[in-house]
Amino acid sequence: MTIKVVIAGFKGKMGSTAVDMVKSDDQLELAGLLDPFATEKEIDGVPVFTVKEALVGFEADVWVDFTMPKVAYGNTRFALENGFAPVVGTTGFTEEQIAELKALSSEKQLGGLIAPNFAIGAILLMEFATKASKYFPDLEIIELHHDKKKDAPSGTAIKTAELIREARAFKKQGAEDEEELITGARGAEFNGFRIHSVRLPGLVAHQEVIFGAQGEGLTLRHDSYDRSSFMSGVNLGIKEVVKRKELVYGLENLLS
Amino acid sequence: MTIKVVIAGFKGKMGSTAVDMVKSDDQLELAGLLDPFATEKEIDGVPVFTVKEALVGFEADVWVDFTMPKVAYGNTRFALENGFAPVVGTTGFTEEQIAELKALSSEKQLGGLIAPNFAIGAILLMEFATKASKYFPDLEIIELHHDKKKDAPSGTAIKTAELIREARAFKKQGAEDEEELITGARGAEFNGFRIHSVRLPGLVAHQEVIFGAQGEGLTLRHDSYDRSSFMSGVNLGIKEVVKRKELVYGLENLLS
Amino acid sequence: MTIKVVIAGFKGKMGSTAVDMVKSDDQLELAGLLDPFATEKEIDGVPVFTVKEALVGFEADVWVDFTMPKVAYGNTRFALENGFAPVVGTTGFTEEQIAELKALSSEKQLGGLIAPNFAIGAILLMEFATKASKYFPDLEIIELHHDKKKDAPSGTAIKTAELIREARAFKKQGAEDEEELITGARGAEFNGFRIHSVRLPGLVAHQEVIFGAQGEGLTLRHDSYDRSSFMSGVNLGIKEVVKRKELVYGLENLLS
Amino acid sequence: MTIKVVIAGFKGKMGSTAVDMVKSDDQLELAGLLDPFATEKEIDGVPVFTVKEALVGFEADVWVDFTMPKVAYGNTRFALENGFAPVVGTTGFTEEQIAELKALSSEKQLGGLIAPNFAIGAILLMEFATKASKYFPDLEIIELHHDKKKDAPSGTAIKTAELIREARAFKKQGAEDEEELITGARGAEFNGFRIHSVRLPGLVAHQEVIFGAQGEGLTLRHDSYDRSSFMSGVNLGIKEVVKRKELVYGLENLLS
């Protein structure tokens, strides 16, 4: 049996990529489309709506939402109240809103997902690096991005470093009498380990965590080439929420 | 408080490497040494024994065993019966022997470890690869070893592939009309994915599992340079068994 | 002083990418555009032509050609006869045509370039790998492409292998008693070395040549993400041909 | 015909490794051994000497020298005067001494090599990186060493950077409004590009130069695992000097 999916915000970049993803998966069926900017009545036989209220009583299983912060909360509430399990990639939810939506989902016995990051690979990398750091306290992070990126280290590298800090026994790495012949050679210091930021044209978004121990090394690397990488996570979200009875925050909670 | 360690088989390669490891860790204390081939009475103040029976009543916490298959079972039994938590790297135990030793350890309320592989990095790689294969069914394994190695793929690659087969939904990878212009280009086929074996001088033992999905990639790599890599695992084993009340088989059961 | 460039075939994918490249480089000036399918008379002040004859007497330095095999020869001849140094990415020239165009360019004292491959990185990789193979006869090639690719090994890998064959003293690599537990593990055999083809979604076009010798390794890797990678080579070609007095075949002849 | 080799300083680490290398190559013959600390008269049929003067009139083609700075100049002179082509790995020669030995070699019509670094892979990496930087001005260097290393960046990284500086058109890389959220993230700045130093247990000596351009990347990596890596260079030196008629300084001058 296929899972019937509504996509809210289908005119946006993420929304339209989600449309392609749903169409290309035999286990999913594109049931409806919603976007206030839509002018079509239907696309390839799929009905198009411009206001969410028109979907009251509509038959579908999952509500994928790539809209805007100001409407996402209302949309997610609406989805839960009307029997659609929400899979939401829009950002900007407050902790209170998340708690409220969780309670509502539980009451309605509907699964759901709100995720700031849908890249399964990035999430697995963080999880694996965190676990490895328990056994290999010596590590360095190298993150590599295109040369238009302004901030260094990247947000993902800092998030990864924070997760490692919680799991790893503190250790100040490197030789005691270590000396930088050129300032910055040893990278950014974070909790006793180092983070290096490479910026080059041609690169997109890449991260490597290298662990070293006597006689061995472990290297974990994630490469992200474009936004389509998020779609594996959206796909997984759709297939998981229909099996569950409560909304979760963070894709990592669906990976077990 | 330090953990007092006896090392059985200290004249062998693994045993003597274990001696160095224990000496270099402040949390451990080398309490005794056992080897039928020893001629010394003591080494640096540490008493040396040639028969295990001489250790009845000896004060120590952990019994590290790198001896030979024919004596390892007897040694492990002896350790448990005399209050030493065993950490055993010798191979050749039958399933019945392991079950029996587990039961004995439980009765004696002693932790213990029998491990065919002490390389934490190799074990983490297998665990991470297995988990990632649930979400990224498209993967290939590249293992790289020195050019004296006879068999291909390596035992570790086959073990990794078997673990992945259990976790991953079967998928025949590659283009449907794929064609090898030179036989073997696409590597060894295993459960729909491919394994490639590289053999070059200078290499030791390395393994990479590469996952690909739309717009992203995840690469996990383990490098093993020499036998000292096993010592992180022995060290972890020593520190874990003293906290436990039952023997386990496989280092992965101490990684949590 | 800027170099004035005409682009023939500007409506095609490569041609339009070349337009963007020329516009974004201060040392280059887009002087004219040619395409039989063009309907505009000019674009942003640049005159547009639909037949090459309209360019007789036109003032420009370089003629970039991304047209079609059947017109490329005529176009290149026309360029040389009218004082434009040609930079041609169209394929399908015969050896006789190339020899003839070389002679014509020499007579006209004009530089020129006909190149089947404009990716500088790929060309450098081949050159470096060829040179390294003289000193490190032990090597393996791993090429990685998207999983829609039909043929394995890739054309670039075979080209690289052929160049290495010419430079390297023949050696049958690997252990003498090497044994494949699963057929294909050791890859495709070429002149005593091995080529491995990885196919995964998310990948584009990548190639690694790994050299091993006692106690050391050398790895050369090229990653190609999209067709824009060809533009560094076109840019280099434009800047080099204006300094020269004879047409060359192959971008490698402009790298010195 | 085999090349007859004398090894001076055969009791040292490098010298004894050279003995093994010569013995394992069918094209070479170990003809004599020299070391003031030797007590043997012969080893496996090879005559052993303790003073160089005893080798006047000795029949051999090449003089491999891994002795000490204070005797190396005298040894090299002696070798040339007695018809042995010198291959010298001892350091500490002045420019005047090198010029003098070059002149002497030329007069004697003997080839010779004095090399501060015999790792062919390291030398090829520098040469390739230097050439690539002409076409890809955007690059970063990552060097990785064991965590006992005091200085960062490594000497090899600085040497590589200097060679690149000479070949590459100056460019200040990275985003104009680049900002380090943690100091040092972007590494050491050298001539507009960046160098990153990773220090981890288990590593030996590794260097990567990563080039990026629109849509493509080129990565060159050298891994050095132990001193035996120098032996490929010594081997090459022995085979090249017998074909030449003048001494050169630097192994790169024998790679063509």
Image (spheres, coloured by chain):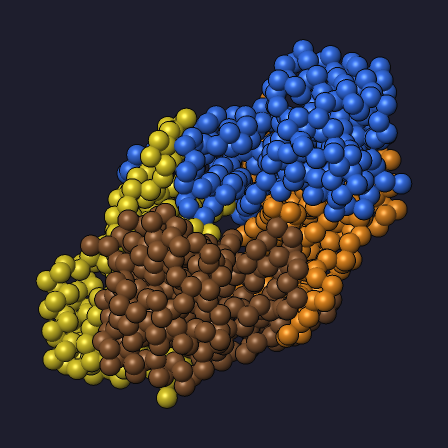
Chain colours: A orange, B blue, C yellow, D brown
- Please indicate whether residue C242 sits to the left or right of residue D36 in the image: left
The residue located at (53%, 32%) in the rendering is: B156
Which image quarter is the N terminus of chain B in? top right
Q: Is residue D108 above or below residue C219?
A: below
Which image quarter is the C terminus of chain B in? top right
Residue A226, position as x, y percentages in the image: 55, 52
Residue D135, position as x, y percentages in the image: 40, 71
The residue located at (46%, 67%) in the rendering is: D67
Q: Is residue C80 above or below residue B62?
A: below
Residue B189 in which image quadrant: top left
Decide which of D78, C188 is in the foreground and name it: D78
Q: Is residue A64 above or below residue D201?
A: above
User: Is residue A136 visible from the viewing direction of this image?
Assistant: yes
Residue B132 in which image quadrant: top right
Decide which of B139, C67 is in the foreground and name it: B139
The residue located at (54%, 52%) in the rendering is: A225
The residue located at (74%, 22%) in the rendering is: B52
- Please indicate whether residue B92 sits to the left or right of residue C210 in the image: right
Decide which of D107, D50 is in the foreground and name it: D50
Decide which of B128, D176 is in the foreground and name it: B128
Residue B27, position as x, y percentages in the image: 82, 43
Count the marks: how many?
0
Residue B192, position as x, y percentages in the image: 46, 28
- Please indicate whether residue A184 sits to the left or right of residue C100 in the image: right
User: Is residue A226 visible from the viewing direction of this image?
Assistant: no
